[in-house]
Image (cartoon, coloured by chain):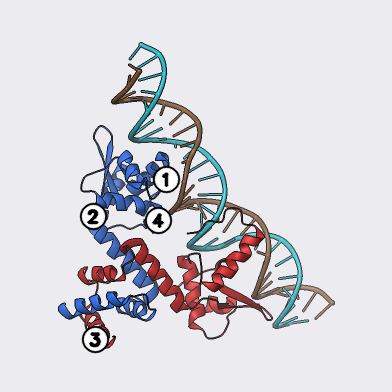
Chain colours: A blue, B red, C brown, D cyan
Amino acid sequence: MVYLAKTTRVIHICMEVNAMINSLAERISDSELEVMKVLWQSDSALSVTDIREALQKSRSWEATTIKTLVSRLVSKGAIRQEKRNVFYYSPLISEREYNSWATRELIERLYNGSAKNMIAALVDSESLTQSDISELREMFRVEE
Amino acid sequence: MVYLAKTTRVIHICMEVNAMINSLAERISDSELEVMKVLWQSDSALSVTDIREALQKSRSWEATTIKTLVSRLVSKGAIRQEKRNVFYYSPLISEREYNSWATRELIERLYNGSAKNMIAALVDSESLTQSDISELREMFRVEE
DNA sequence: CATATCAGACTACACCTGTCAACCGTTTTT
DNA sequence: AAAAACGGTTGACAGGTGTAGTCTGATATG
């Protein structure tokens, strides 16, 4: 994990570039992820209020809590803020990228880097429903 | 994640029971996992010294560090200690169980609970090698 | 037996995370 | 214009994590 204590502007820019190039050097925490999901879901940038509104149902967070999460995501280079009247936030890393990064990380951590091992484990831990399996079978039949 | 603010003894016992029944309510951290892996690899219980020896190559941790990790794992109910001359430790949760629990958790977190979505993502992020794919195809052909 | 060694307990400390309150300036409402 | 509401910044605090030092009692060794 990379620690960026006192980020100067320069370092900040580097982080952004970095985030774009190899998608994120730091983990996104559970709560932060909730915020990311909201941003990913929206096609335009959102303000804190927007985010809060979107989360109303699932999480009853105070506005400050969301603000904190958002700030942390900015420091991590996961999202970008853009000043209009108010700050608007949008992701710097796509859900797709993040998911596959995180999945890869898990595979590294637990399955010795072998995706196949993971899938095999899923199959024989009976975590897959019958319909999962048939869809997967379909998928692998078509894929070449 | 379950937070137990002021844990009373009772709650603590519940946690332990819980850990045994449905294998672990708390996450195992990265460093802790290294220790778990060593224990999983061995068929007999190990002392801290044994663990340290096994980790010699990969991690140059001080003995106290390992002891700390081991203690934390004991509190979490992930391993058990057994007094001989010295304490010997062995897993309470199997690697298999842990892996599939953690994988499930990731699927919940990122793929809306659908294992199929995760696998699909892996496939189209090109994280799978050609040989992974053929092995998987094999696997799904045989599975019924 | 005396000393050197070591295992285990306790403590520590910085950083991360979850959650929020207080304060402060700007914008909107009365 | 005064008051209310809102957005942003700072600070906070408890619990988790990475990593390790110190102390104390047991064990091994001369």
Q: Which amino acid type is shown beneath numbered disc 2?
A: Met
How many residues crowd mark 2 within 10 Å: few (<14), some (14–19), many (20+)?
Answer: some
- Spatial CA distance of label 3 from label 2 is 39 Å
Pair 4/2: label in front: 4
Of residues B80 and B45, the one drawn nearer to the viewer in this rendering: B80
- Spatial CA distance of label 1 from label 2 is 32 Å
Which residue is disc 1 drawn over? A60
How many residues crowd mark 1 within 10 Å: few (<14), some (14–19), many (20+)?
Answer: few
Considering only vertical position in the picture, is A89 above or below B20?
Answer: above
Considering only vertical position in the picture, is A107 above or below D3?
Answer: below
Which residue is disc 3 drawn over? B141
Q: Secondary structure at mark 4?
A: helix
Pair 1/2: label in front: 1
- Spatial CA distance of label 3 from label 1 is 46 Å
Which residue is disc 4 drawn over? A30
Q: Which amino acid type is shown beneath numbered disc 4?
A: Asp
